[in-house]
Structure formats: C-alpha cells, structure tokens
C-alpha cells in the first residue's frame, strides 16, 4: 500500500514536529514534503498531498475539498513574533498607503487586512511579493508584512527607524481570542481509511508532544541552520500552541466571520473534522 503523503512546514514554528520526524521512524512511515505554507496550500488543493498543514484561510476557501484533522493546529494567544508588520510610519498613518505582503502564506494577508480595517479603519493598497530581506520595505511601499522565520529574524533584529507591529497581539486586542494560523487538513479525494487517518493523526500529535518535551535537543539540532539563538527559539516556542480545543474553534470561527464581513471569503465555512477514533 502506498505511504501517506504528508506535508510539513519548514519553519521554526513546527520545530517540535521537525525533530520528531528526524529522530523517529516518521521519514520511513510517510512520504514527507517540507515546504513553506503557500506551496503546501497549493499541493493539497491540487491533490498532490493527502494530509498537510495549511494556512487556516485556505480551509475556508476550499472546505468543499478538505476536512480538518482534529487536535492539532499552529496557534498563539496574543503576541506571536512571527507575523510582523514592519513599517516606515506608525500604523495609524498607513491609510491609502501601499503595503507589501509576503508570498509565503495566505492567512497572514487576511489577518492583517482584518486588523487594519476593524481596529484602525484603514483602507490600504496591497501587493504580494517575494520579500528581499536585505531591503524589507521596497521604495514604493510604506510597510511590509513578514511571516515565519523572516518575521522572527526581524523581530529580533530591529532597525531604529522602523515601526514593528505583532499582528497576533493586534488580533488579541481586537477580539480577545487566540489566533489559529494553520490547521492540518485531509484532501477528501485521498484514499485513506479511518485506520490511516488515526495513524497519521496520532503520529503528528505525538510528534509535537515528544518534540516539545525534548525542546532543548530539538533547538540544538537546528542552531547551525537558523539565524537565532537557543534562547530566542525557546522564547518563541513558549508562545506557540499546537492544540485544537473548543476555544481554538471559537477563535477560528471569529476569524472566518471577520474575513467574510470584510469580503475576503465568499461564505462562512462549516468546520468539519475527519474521524480518527
């Protein structure tokens, strides 16, 4: 029987699972594809992956093709460090200004648009680009949205003449809720039975637990590959959460509600889980 094809985000926010993949049998048990969220988003929709994490807005846009794997997400309750708006001006002065959006994700685009509109009543002009980290804000833009390790690097290496806004913190102020940045989804066309789904689910959930329980070893394993200190990675992992509880569901539905109200999605999706028990 073919192995389950499993997507994996190659950012520090999935480090516990990355460590589990590299130190257990997961590499031999699955066909694993590591990539940035935007690539995984495309591959699951096109049927090239069976299971993968996706930007949470992707589920809302494609929930006729996908179901959510329960008990796992990438979330944070407040400041997240890795969804960062870097601006030449204070955020209140960005009305009608151009903002560059990283091409690496999709949820962050919607989240920023919601925050700027709902919290600050701003109407901005947006362009999706491949960000040059040596010139984060191109000349014609006033701000750039960064995600993942790019955002985390900027968070720890700030330029004195720029303004930095943690969009996770802004969402918390706006809604009082955590933010669900990514969910694991199953393609409805995947030839997987309940036993396959349970196997994959258990490996992913346990992988995060085991990796976090061995956090110091996990951090040590990537120090020569990333531009962060062990203290910075440890601090970052403390703000992240990989569960999917009733509170996470409430938060995700609020995100979808505001996305719908702002014309970012055509309809409110139902949150449907695959059965793993």
Image: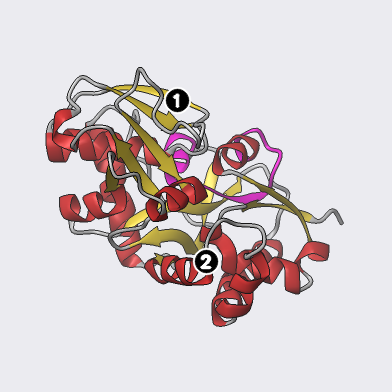
* Residue nearer the viewer, 94 or 66: 94
Q: Secondary structure at mark 2?
A: loop
Q: Position of residue 46 (x, y in %)?
A: 65, 33
* Whether residue 207 is situated above or below residue 170 in the rendered picture: below
Residue at numbered disc 2: 229
* Whether residue 258 is situated above or below residue 132 in the rendered picture: below
The reply to whether residue 198 is in sight is no
Position of the N terminus, as image quadrant, is: bottom right
Instruction: Give, as a single range, the part of the protein colored magenta.
Output: 44-62
Image check: 210 left or right of 162?
right
* Residue nearer the viewer, 227 or 13: 227
* Whether residue 277 is situated above or below residue 143 in the rendered picture: below
The crowd level at tag 2 (other Cα within 10 Å; few <14, some 14-19, many 20+) is some
* Residue nearer the viewer, 222 or 105: 222
Residue at numbered disc 1: 128
Q: Secondary structure at mark 1?
A: strand
What is the C-alpha distance between the residues marked 2 and 1?
30 Å
Q: Residue at x 24, y 23 (%)?
A: 124
Q: Residue at x 14, y 41 (%)?
A: 119
Q: Residue at x 29, y 26 (%)?
A: 142
Q: Which mark is residue 65?
A: none
Q: Position of residue 254 (x, y in %)?
A: 26, 49
Q: Position of residue 188 (x, y in %)?
A: 61, 44
- Give yes or no for residue 183 being in the magenta stretch: no
Dividing the picture into quarters, in which one does residue 117 lie?
A: top left
Earlier-in-chain disc, 2 versus 1: 1
* Whether residue 264 is situated above or below residue 203 in the rendered picture: above
Dividing the picture into quarters, in which one does residue 75 lie?
A: bottom left
For discs 2 and 1, the disc positioned in front in the rendered view: 2
The reply to whether residue 53 is in sight is yes
């Amino acid at each position: 029987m073919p192995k389950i094809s499993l997507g994996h985000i190659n950012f520090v926010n999935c480090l516990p699972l990355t460590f589990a993949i590299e130190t257990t049998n997961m590499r031999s048990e699955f066909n694993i594809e590591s990539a940035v969220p935007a690539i995984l988003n495309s591959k699951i929709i096109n049927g090239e992956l069976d299971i993968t994490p996706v930007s949470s807005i992707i589920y809302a846009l494609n929930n006729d093709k996908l179901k959510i794997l329960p008990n796992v997400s990438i979330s944070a309750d407040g400041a997240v460090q890795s969804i960062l708006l870097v601006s030449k001006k204070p955020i209140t002065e960005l009305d009608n200004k151009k903002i560059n959006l990283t091409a690496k994700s999709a949820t962050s685009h919607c989240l920023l648009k919601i925050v700027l509109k709902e919290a600050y009543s701003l109407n901005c002009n947006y362009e999706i680009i491949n960000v040059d980290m040596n010139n984060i804000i191109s000349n014609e833009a006033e701000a750039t949205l960064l995600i993942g390790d790019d955002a985390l690097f900027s968070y720890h290496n700030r330029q004195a003449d720029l303004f930095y806004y943690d969009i996770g913190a802004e969402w918390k102020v706006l809604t009082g809720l955590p933010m669900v940045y990514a969910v694991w989804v199953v393609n409805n066309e995947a030839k997987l039975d309940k036993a396959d789904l349970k196997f994959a689910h258990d490996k992913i959930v346990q992988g995060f637990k085991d990796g976090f329980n061995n956090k110091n070893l996990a951090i040590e394993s990537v120090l020569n590959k990333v531009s962060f200190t062990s203290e910075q990675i440890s601090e970052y992992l403390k703000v992240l959460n990989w569960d999917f509880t009733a509170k996470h569901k409430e938060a995700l539905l609020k995100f979808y509600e505001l996305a719908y109200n702002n014309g970012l999605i055509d309809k409110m999706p139902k949150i449907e889980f695959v059965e793993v028990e």
